[in-house]
Image (cartoon, rainbow, N blue to C red):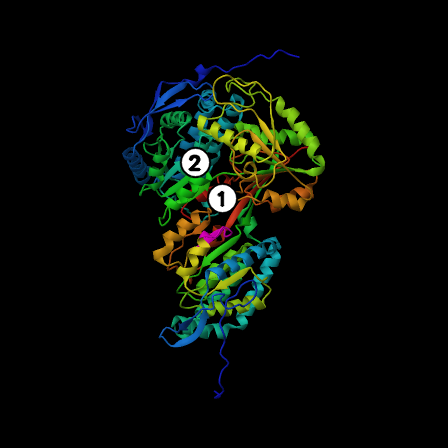
Amino acid sequence: MWEYAPAPESRDIANLKPAYKMFVDGKFVEGTGEPLKTINPATEEVLAEVSTASESDVDTAVKAARKAYDRVWSKMPGSERAKYIYRIARQIQERGRELAVLESLDNGKPIKESRDTDIPTAASHFFYHAGWADKLGYAGYGPDPKPLGVAGQVIPWNFPLLMAAWKIAPALACGNTVVLKPAETTPLTALVLADIIQQCDLPPGVVNIIPGAGDVGAALVGHADVNKVAFTGSTDVGKVIQGQLAGTNKKLTLELGGKAANIVFDDAPLDQAVEGIVNGIFFNQGHVCCAGSRLLVQESIADELIEKLHARVSTLRVGDPLDKNTDVGAINSREQLTKIQELTASGEAEGATRWTSSCPLPDKGFFFAPTVFSGVSQAMRIAREEIFGPVLSVLTFRTPEEAVAKANNTPYGLSAGIWTEKGSRILWMAQRMRAGVVWSNTFNRFDPTAPFGGYQESGFGREGGRTGLEAYLDV
Amino acid sequence: MSDRLTVAKTYKLYIGGKFPRSESGRSYPVTDSKGTFLANAAQGSRKDARDAVSAARKAFGGWSGTTAYNRGQVLYRVAEVLEGRREQFITEVATSEGVALKKAQSLVDTAIDRWVWYAGWTDKIAAVLGSSNPVAGPYFSFSTPEPTGVVAVLAPQQSSLLGLISVIAPVIASGNTCVVITSQDRPLPAITLSEVLATSDVPGGVVNIITGRTAEIAPWLASHGDVNALDLTGAPESIRADLERSAAGTVKRVLRNKVNEDFTATPDMSRLRAFLETKTVWHPMGV
């Protein structure tokens, strides 16, 4: 056996500053809200102080976005908008390493994920959408589709920069201006993106970034001069926002929670399936709305699969997010850790069998060892509620029909996974999944060209692809 | 004209392919635009709405699972049967809406043509709205539009046939099933349409039609957990925001089209798009 040797990325690369300001009308300004301290969830140390927006700052930001929309952005030819957006894509690539380290510091996700997934995919979203800016007439919404105006966007903490890219890139490509509120616990990379936007010489007010808590988000989506609201986050908050927008003319898209079924048939290549299951639930500590959190295994192979799964999960390294060997990083906040602990306790109380990896955990910071529940029934909370953590619930089925019924037995409908060698069965199953994304013999794949979004209470509207443009056009 | 006494029709609801009276036992008088009594229509209740949702849910798997070609033929068949009832619809629209026969004729003709237009969409939606996604990796990725599910449709209050058809046809063309609350004061052409649907090849439960007070029944549909989407077109202005708030409780898709939409204008795809989901499927490529 080899001795374990940590390979930590240097935190100096993040260019961490002691204080960050909000970005309004092309300038970094002090917000008049109560400043927040953002912490490193792996160590609980304060990373930086971040100024936040008050209600009047929200108004200032919306006014700046309106002015930029009326005077500059809506009048600019699409071909010029495109070049600005391409610039942003390139700068994200150029500063990719800095952004990756900063993301892992602020969010707690493993550096290999921020480096290989979050940051490159954020750049690719800008690059992809840049090309649409002068081709909207070909998108299938008529010869000259118009933008909506000012977009108010609220994003979550699980993919801070990537979600900012998913929101800002299509909005700008379609000719809208933006006020974006990053999550309270992960504001830093969005503010570096603001720095990039400033360096790209985007006209002042086209993008405004205002940190803060839920009240800032509520003020933003409720602002009378916002034309479009896009929200990614929990289903509970999504419902509140949809209710808040009732009776207005604001266009709304929601990307909310999920409780995806990952379905493994008896003919699946098991080793490959195990990798997919592990990726499906332990990627990003399970802080993924489309995580494969309900494993549905065909009964005849359940014991064998669970054994292989335990063996594989035992090898996952949990710890320092900046260590390039780390597979599972820190839980993003104490609040989230408490929620995961509470739900796993309910799994035990309701009679499911708990298995938890014996991997060592760091002494400080928010960590949760990968956990697999077997003997789970559909009525249990761990089978119904989104845990948003590294916790997998295993259920079984006998026939494909039963697998379909159990997979769809949820108010959510964001994603699903299917593992089988039989092509016709994949297509039959995929057709029957009431879910917006179906991964077959793979899981957690994302691309700006592939529309992403939910059925039912996982939200409405799509992000990515030609389909995703509809959310930012007046059509 | 003979002196023969005509056989008056009993106007009932249309739920699950059957014509029940309202479970509530209520009816309300329907008059023409001058206030002359025409008939009693069933005054649908919360229970009727729930029964209709159950029927629509039951029909969803079958209807959404038929081939697009088959759905196209079924819808085209409806247009054929509509054409056969053209004279009856002209009289009913003229009476209900208080328009001259010539105007009614034009409205009915447009309505039949509108149905044909949507019938032709069934097997083209996926090609126009779907995509093959050129993802950056060794995967085949494609996206297809799929029906949202059960749609509650509040039919326009003014346009009793053309408006009605313009809101129903796009919903079912893509494979959704629906519960329709008709125009409150002009419900009779809708009942006749339900007879057309029952005698075409549209499976029972795909379209369910309820007459009665829109403001009384709509809130139950807006909050119903098994309704996926809500078309507010015919909702009274005073309750639109409340209905939207209720719909938010289960994240329904809500179409907020204008109260006085001009249905004589040529439509675009927006009503089709409003009740479609996009499903993206991925599979690795390799040997």
Tell which subunit mark 1 falls on.
Answer: A
Mark 1 or mark 2, which is nearer the start of the sequence?
A: 2
Question: The C terminus of chain B is located in which quarter?
Answer: top right
Q: Are marks 2 and 1 in contact (CB under 8 Å)?
A: no
**B33 up-or-down from A208: above or below:** below
Q: Do labels 2 and 1 share a chain?
A: yes
**A61 up-or-down from B116: above or below:** above
Nearest the viewer among B187 and A180 is B187
In the image, which residues are magenta?
A: B223-231
Residue on which the image places disc 2? A167
Q: What residue type is labelled 1?
A: Glu
Q: In the rendered view, does A137 fall on the left or right side of B63?
A: left
Tell which subunit mark 2 falls on.
Answer: A
Residue on which the image places disc 1? A457
Q: In the rendered view, does A445 fall on the left or right side of A97?
A: right
**Is residue B225 a member of the stretch shown in magenta?**
yes
Q: In the rendered view, does A10 fall on the left or right side of A57?
A: right
**A422 up-or-down from A9: above or below:** below
Q: Where is residue A114 in the image (x, y as percent from the top left)?
A: 50, 24
**Is residue A7 a member of the stretch shown in magenta?**
no
Q: Position of residue A193 (x, y in %)?
A: 40, 27
Residue at image location 52% in from the left, 54% down from the top: B150
**Any mark on residue A3, and which?**
none
How many residues crowd around disc 2 within 10 Å: few (fewer than 14), some, or many (20 or more)?
A: many
Check disc 2 and report its element: helix, strand or loop. Answer: helix
The Cα–Cα distance between marks 2 and 1, rounded to whole angstroms, is 20 Å
Please say whether residue A445 is visible from this viewpoint.
no
